[in-house]
Amino acid sequence: MTVAGWLATGAVGLLAGAVSGLVGIGGGAIMVPFLYFFLAHPELSGAQLSPADQAVVAHATSLLVIVPISLRGAWLYNRARLVEWPAVWRMGLASVITAVLGARVAVVVPGELLKVVFGIFLLVVSARLLVGGRRAELHSAEERAPLPMGRALAGGAAVGFFSALLGVGGGLVAIPVLIYGLHISLRKVSATSLAVITFTALTGVIAYGISGWADHASGTALTYFHLPACLGLAVGALVAVPVGPFIQQRMPTHALRWLFAAVFLLLGLRIAAGNLLGLLGR
């Protein structure tokens, strides 16, 4: 990998780490588009890959970086006692099973249509947060006791599948589940989401490693991971992750609601529009 490649991955890692720590989405939504561009330019990445392999390597590499990001973020939030561990264990364990399925689907099946639907889902969540206003804040503040087991398991299953399929860690699914399904307070959503996606990202990494071993008999279990890019992204991200919790714990609740809504709106538009263009272009 070139010097420009190291600088680029480090800079993107800084941005991904800060956003991850602030919102609780893992950073994959930032890293995956960058990795698409990065891997398509061998003069930066030093890797000669087919277009199909570029997508898989981008998703797998993103998940590998998300593991230390989410661990670091969850640890920082846990020091402030903001992680809802009952939700983490239920959702995390359920996500392990479906993350394996999502990784296998991502390797063998084009997922544009599913991604368009997912993008629309994010837009709906954004609209609910914006239109619901104060009601959304009060709704999430009514933390249920005991935690609804069925909702936590179903939500965790969805998180695991989309985590591995999209290479985004699963926070984009975990956050709506935590707010509307489990009624976790907005103050604790980012913290709990980061802890949940540690499970899903790690499972996805293992699944991609196994897939790489099976699909490339002459290679190794690291076939689907661009390790220099992983290192550059991870170093930048780990430096920036503490910025997120520092800012988040000082934001008023209504500002958190607007932050989540803005993130879902932007990412929903990008995911839905980008993949819809891909479908129409076939």
Image: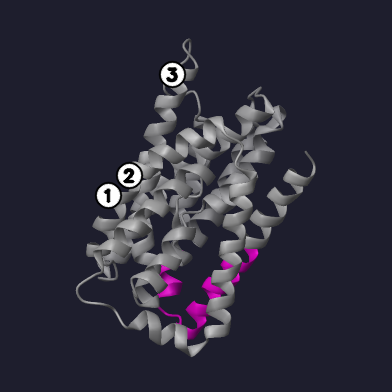
Report, in whole angstroms, how far the alpha carbon at label 2 lies from the one at label 3. 20 Å
Whether residue 129 sits left or right of residue 273 in the image: it is: left
Residue identified by numbered label 1: 93
Identify which residue is drawn at 53% across, 39% down: 59
Pinpoint residue 192: horizontal percent, then vertical percent.
Answer: 33, 64
Q: Residues within 10 Å of mark 2 (few under 14, many from 20)?
A: many
Give the mark nearest the N terminus, 1 or 3: 1
Task: Name the mark on residue 233.
Answer: none
Are the two marked residues, 2 and 1, in contact with CB atoms closer than 8 angstroms?
A: yes
Between 209 and 19, the residue placed more toward the observer is: 209
Residue 68 higher or lower than 213, as above or below? below
Residue identified by numbered label 2: 96
Give the mark nearest the N terminus, 2 or 3: 2
Circle 3 sits in a helix, a strand or a loop, which is it? helix
Between 41 and 2, the residue placed more toward the observer is: 41
What number of labels is visible? 3
Residue type of the residue flagged with mark 3: Ala
The residue furthest bottom is 134
Residue 114 higher or lower than 57, as above or below? below
Report, in whole angstroms, how far the alpha carbon at label 2 lies from the one at label 1. 5 Å
Q: Which span of residues is magenta-colored?
A: 243-266
Res. 91 visible in picture: yes
